[in-house]
Amino acid sequence: MQICEITYDSASATDNMAIDATMLDFGGKMGQVMWRLYGWDEPAITFGYSQNWSWIQAYMHDFEGVCIRRITGGGIVDHRHDLTYALSLPPVHPLHREPATNLYRNLHQHIAEILLDLGFPADVAPCNKPCSEDNSILPTGICFAAPEPYDVIQKPSGVKLAGAAMKRNQSGILVQGSLDLQHLPGLSQDVFEREFGRVLARWLDGERTKFSGNLPLDKLVEERDRFLSKEWNQKR
């Protein structure tokens, strides 16, 4: 199976969310793993699919930027000082039916190992209670306020370095993740991209390749319209 890497780019919050959603849909139809590392060309926060809009407004009342609801779960993520990635697995991939907590833990174990190799003291936060598919152990509220089980943390301080949120549907699994650059000084985007791609190819048992085509424009436009709409962002 191909592990298709989309070239790094920066975009608006709306476009970034539209690209991730389209990547999930397209990768599922093509039977390909897809991933990308990306940046933001405007101050932006994203918040989890199930979060309450009134609470978001109250909490972010002094934020001068764009607030967009993700299709994945989790909590508020401030993207002004992060390195962001998205990973999609098609339904035909063997890990598609893996419990969410297992995927979350394994993905973050790989990220922690990359950071360790690059000189950052990183580990995976333990789960101090029985952990299962129960979504209650996955991130909620404010993503980087405190580590949740299986987040990537700094040793020995316990400061959260990386977190992620997931969406599983008939198109596959989408993971949207973030690394806090404020606590990873000097982390090279190019180096992390290279090492993350290498690790994904090994973990997901596929051939790493650059995505040379284009995501379908009609789907991108459809998703962009969704993420721009009040109906979507204020739906809860």
Image: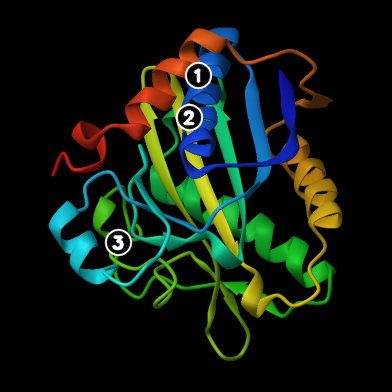
Question: Mark 3 or 2 closer to N-term?
Answer: 2
Measure the alpha-carbon separation of dots 3 and 2: 22 Å
Q: Mark 3 points at which residue?
A: 140
Foreground of the two, 86 or 148 = 86
Vertical placement of residue 77 versus 168, above or below: below
Q: Residue 18 carries which label?
A: 2
Colour basis: rainbow
User: x%, y% of residue 172?
Assistant: 45, 23
Asked whether residue 52 is in view, the answer is no
Which amino acid lies under the numbered mark 1 shown in the image of this protein?
Leu
Helix, strand or loop at label 2? It is: helix
Asked whether residue 216 is in view, the answer is yes
User: x%, y% of residue 123?
Assistant: 62, 73
Measure the alpha-carbon separation of dots 1 and 2: 6 Å
Q: The C terminus is located in which quarter?
A: top left
Q: Crowding at label 2, few (<14), some or many (≥20) Cα neighbours within 10 Å?
A: many
Residue plotted at (54% across, 42% down): 12
Which amino acid lies under the numbered mark 2 shown in the image of this protein?
Ala
Helix, strand or loop at label 3? It is: loop
